[in-house]
Image: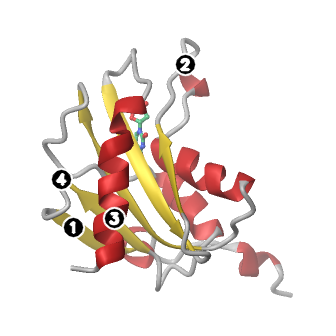
Amino acid sequence: MNNSYKELIKLAIDNLKNSYAPYSKFNVSAAVLADSGKIYTGVNAENAAYPATMCAERSAIFHAVSCGERSFTAIAIVGGHDYQIKDYCAPCGVCRQVMREFSDPKEMRVILAKSTDDYREFTLEELLPESFGPEDLSKE
Ligand code: THU
C-alpha cells in the first residue's frame, strides 16, 4: 500500500471526531495531500439553516488553499452515521468539481476508506468524466 495514502486515511479517521453534524448525524472527514507534501484535514460543518452546510472534502481543500496550496494529488474520505465508519463514503458532485479546480483529474486519487487497510481508490477522472476545468475558460 502507498504509505502516504495510509497516513492520509489515518489522519481523516483521527479527525472524524471533529465533524459537526447535529442535523443529519452523518459525519464525514477528509484529508487532502498537497504538492508541497503537507496534509490538510476538514470535516463537514452543518448549519441550522441547512444549505449553509459545508462538506468535509471542501473544508479540507479550502483549509489547504487558505494556507497557500493550489495543487493536490490525493484525498482520503471517511464517514458514516454517528461517527461510525461502516461503508465507503463517496464525495458529492460539488466536491468533485472543487477537486477538479485544483488537480489533474488523471492523476488525482480519491480514496474512499473504511480503515487504513480497507479502501477503494479512484482517479478523479473516473468520478468526474468529461469535466470542465480552469483551462476550458482560456480556450478561444
Ligand atoms: N457530506 C460531506 O461532508 N461530503 C460529501 O461529499 C457528502 C455529504 C455531508 C454533508 C452533510 O453534513 C452530511 O454529509 C449529510 O449530507
Residue in the image at 49% along x and 61% along y: 32
Decide which of tag 1 and tag 2 comes sooner along the chain: 2
- Indicate the quadrant where residue 134 lies: bottom right
Which one is closest to the eye, mark 1 or mark 4? 4
Q: Give the spatial CA distance, label 1 vs label 3.
A: 15 Å
115 over 119 or under it: above or below: above
38 over 113 or under it: above or below: below
Q: Of helix, strand and loop, which one carries label 3?
A: helix
Q: Which residue is mark 1?
A: 120
Ligand 1 positioned in quadrant: top left
26 over 77 or under it: above or below: above
Q: Give the spatial CA distance, label 1 vs label 2.
A: 30 Å
Amino acid type at mark 2: Asn
Classify residue 129 as left or right of residue 116: right
Image quadrant containing the C terminus: bottom right
Expressed as whole percent of the image width and height from the top left, the position of residue 84 reads: 18, 34
Q: Which mark is residue 7?
A: 3
Amino acid type at mark 4: Lys
- Labels 3 and 4 touching (C-beta < 8 A): no
Decide which of tag 1 and tag 3 comes sooner along the chain: 3
Amino acid type at mark 1: Arg
Which one is closest to the eye, mark 1 or mark 3? 3
Residue 94 visible (yes or no) = no
Decide which of tag 2 and tag 4 comes sooner along the chain: 2
Amino acid type at mark 3: Glu
Q: Which mark is residue 114?
A: 4
Expressed as whole percent of the image width and height from the top left, the position of residue 136 reads: 73, 79
Q: Give the spatial CA distance, label 2 vs label 4.
A: 26 Å
Expressed as whole percent of the image width and height from the top left, the position of residue 124 reads: 44, 73
Q: Which residue is mark 2?
A: 47
Expressed as whole percent of the image width and height from the top left, the position of residue 42 reads: 50, 44
